[in-house]
Amino acid sequence: MVSVAPNRRVSQAAFVATMSDAPSHASDVAARWTTLPGGLIDGGEIVVLAIKPSLWRPVFDSAVWLATSAMFAATLTLIGLPLPGLSPATTAQLVLLIGFTGLGLALVRWTTTWHVLTNRRIIDIHGIRTPRIAACLLVNVRNTYLRASVPERVTRIGTITFVTDEVDRLPHLWRSIPHPEEVHAKIRRAIENAIDQSSVGG
C-alpha cells in the first residue's frame, strides 16, 4: 500500500507538467467522448482523466457466483441428480447459467461506472438506470492510498482510496484501476496543483 500526503505548496514546474498532461478539449467534447452525464463538468473545468475500472472487476465481483455454480453443476453431474423432468446435462447448464447471470449483472454495473478527475474535483459515477454522482473538491482530499489485493496484483491493477474532509461520508474508492501507479501520480499532481491554486487565489 502506498500512502502519500498532500503537499501544501508545489513548484511552478510541477503545475506546468500537470497541465500538459491534461486534455485541451472543451468539457462538452470530453463528456461526449466518455459518455459522461450532461452538465457534469462546470465551465472552465478541465477533465484530466475519465476512466473505468478494469474488465477484471466484473469477474472479481461475480467470482463467488461463478465458482459456486460451477461446483454445484459438477456435483449434480457426478452424482447424477438432475432437476425433475430435465436431463443431467440440462440441469448442469441451468445451474451454470445462474453463475453467468451474476457475471452479466456485474458487466452491466461496469458499463455505467466512471471515475473522473478534473482540475478541481474527483467525481464517481455509478448506477444502471439513474446515475449516482458523488464528487469531492481536490482541496478537500487529505490523503490517498494505493493498494492491491492478491487478484489485483496478479492482474496488475490496483485500488485508490481518497481520504477527505467529508467526515459524514465513506472514502471515495477507485477500484481495480488499470495502470494504478500512473493514475495515482496524476491524481497527486492534480491535488497539489489545486491546493497551490487555492492558496494563490486566497
Image (cartoon, helix red, strand yellow):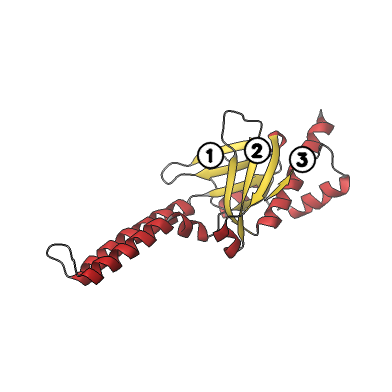
Tag 2's secondary structure?
strand
Q: Is residue 95 left or right of residue 52?
A: left
Q: CA distance from mark 1 to mark 2?
A: 17 Å
Give the mark toward the camera: 1 or 2: 2
Q: Residue at x 43, y 54 (%)?
A: 106
Q: Amino acid at mark 3?
A: Pro
Name the residue that disc number 3 marks.
6
Name the residue that disc number 2 marks.
163
Q: Is residue 132 left or right of residue 72?
A: right
- Which of the two labelled residues, at mark 1 and mark 2, occupies the earlier sequence position? 1
Residue 184 placed where, x, y %? 69, 51
Q: Which mark is residue 98?
A: none
- Which of the two labelled residues, at mark 2 and mark 3, occupies the earlier sequence position? 3
Callout 1 environment at 10 Å: few (<14), some (14 to 19), or many (20+)?
some
Q: Residue at x 63, y 48 (%)?
A: 160
Disc 2 vs disc 3: Cβ atoms closer than 8 Å? no
Residue 38 placed where, x, y %? 54, 43
Q: Residue furthest right?
A: 12
Depth order, front residue of 133/172: 172
Number of numbered discs on residues: 3
Name the residue that disc number 1 marks.
133
Q: Is residue 73 above or below residue 19?
A: below
For the question of whether residue 45 can be seen, the reply is no
Tag 3's secondary structure?
loop
Q: Is residue 106 above or below residue 37?
A: below
Residue 10 placed where, x, y %? 84, 42
Q: CA distance from mark 3 to mark 1?
A: 24 Å
- Which of the two labelled residues, at mark 3 and mark 1, occupies the earlier sequence position? 3
